[in-house]
Amino acid sequence: MIEKNMGIKIGEAIEKVNGKELSYRVFVEKYMAKNQPVVLTGLMDDWRACKDWVADSGQPNLQFFFTHFGKSKVQVADCDTREFTDQKRVEISVSEFVKHWLKNSIQQNRDTEINEANGNSVLYLKDWHFVKEYPEYLAYRTPLIFCDDWLNMYLDNYRLHKDPDSYKKDNDISCSDYRFVYMGAKGSWTPLHADVFRSYSWSANVCGKKKWLFLSPSQCHLVFDRQANLKSSVYNIFDDVSETNFPDFKKAIWLECTQEQNEIIFVPSGWYHQVHNLEDTISINHNWFNSYNLSWVWDLLLKDYNEAKEYIEDIRDICDDFEGLCQRNLAANTGMNFYDFFIFISRFTLLNVVILFHLLGDYENPIWSSSTLAKHLALNLVSIRKIALKMKTGGIAAGNCGFFVDLRETLDDAEFLKLCTGLCRIYGMIHEEEKWSSEIKKALTVDFGDYGSLISSPEELVKFIDYASGKLSGNCSEENFLLSRLEDA
Ligand SMILES: O=C(O)CCC(=O)C(=O)O
């Protein structure tokens, strides 16, 4: 069914499902693997945030924020002022933000023009790294179905981008994780965009109500600017959208959804979305990726790289290290470059391999070889291998720039042990096989025999996965599902 709403076409409704009755397997099959949005209820019952952050009136408990977190410095978007492709942002303290909010709500004046004339634009607190800043205050627990989160797990132990020239250990919190709190009065909003790295995201309404409009990736070309080389998209889909710049905009079919308090929305990879707070709202959201959407991340990096390269093409001849400059620009624009991504997938390869070896080697009970957990690990390796093959075809050679992963050194690394323990704990919970994960330190004593220690190119990464798969056939009496998955792939 298609209806018209303020000039845009609205398609089917987004499914709403009781999250308590949704198993991890069904979530993966119906939504994560198919990249479909869904709204989930019943997953926030015991969250501390739902008590502390909501006043008896049902409104945001601004006093609580003022008293407990008032000194925090946060990014605030001015919803009435566009700056390039986003809203203008400033940094202020939470207490200043709360004062501004209260002043505006007392005036009860939501007329944009009058507000602007009075300097009272609607401010929206965004991307607050609350968990990083207040690790002791357990505001919520990530629902299990969203826990296979390689991005935040990795960032708890490593940095995503490590520039060898300018790297310094600082306290920069801005790219320290992708777990955020958002707070905004009725009328605050977020312009049309797709998420960072084309990651998945989930967003939970602790208080208030949001309207979401989604556009599937298959239709995204309809919102790109033909006059700007398809490099920017529509800013506000409810504006008068220029026919010259966006001639096919009217063909787009949007999915609309009203998200109530205590509901969580799952935003799939690469879907464009615009969001409006219909009431005073506080939400928590995470961005993440894992083996199901990692290829989206790679495709975006490649696209951004080609754009970064094209942009400086005319200085190629006078540049000593043109490729290095492209990679620096890519990291500055996108948050990571090819080498960061390569190191990331190499570490996750090693993680999945050692856990799989441990599972199949130490636990001779044949049920392990066919367990859902072992299959999950195998599927992760199959996905990484496919991406490494794509990188190899594209001629990406991380080693040329001195980037590599040393397998033995990594296994001895305290950060890697923490990452491994974290992944095991989560996979143990997801697959209800918790008993084995306590022994994970043993897994890192794995011996790769005479296999070389360095992985410095996508080609070598593929070889390592194939080596691991071959070794597993020796260990595994029954079907070697990694081999069979690799054959199917
Ligand atoms: O809630 C909002 O205003 C925007 C959130 C968003 O875009 C996201 O979670 O991806």
Image: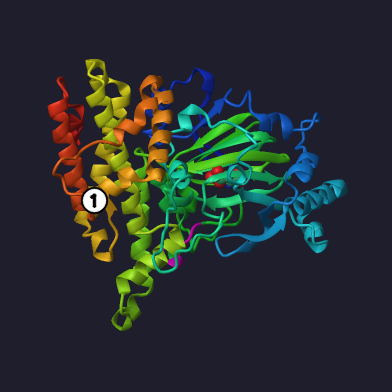
Choose between 250 and 434: the one closer to the eye: 434
Snapshot quadrant of residue 456? bottom left
Snapshot quadrant of residue 228? bottom left
Which residue does the image show at 47% across and 51% down from the upper left? Answer: 196
What is the residue that sits farthest to the bottom in this orientation?
318
On the image, numbered disc 1 is attached to which residue? 390
Choose between 307 and 320: the one closer to the eye: 320
Instruction: Identify the main secondary structure in magenta.
Output: loop
Whether residue 110 is visible to the viewer of this picture, yes or no, is: no
Choose between 444 and 107: the one closer to the eye: 444
Where, quadrant-wise, is the C terminus in this rendering? top left
What range of the chain is rendered magenta? 227-233
Residue 63 against residue 342 in the figure, above or below = above
Which residue does the image show at 64% across and 45% down from the upper left? Answer: 182
Please give left or right for residue 443 compared with residue 308 in the image.
left
Type of amino acid at the residue the image marks with label 1? Lys
Whether residue 68 is visible to the viewer of this picture, yes or no, is: yes
Residue 356 x %, y %: 27, 30
Residue 444 x %, y %: 30, 36
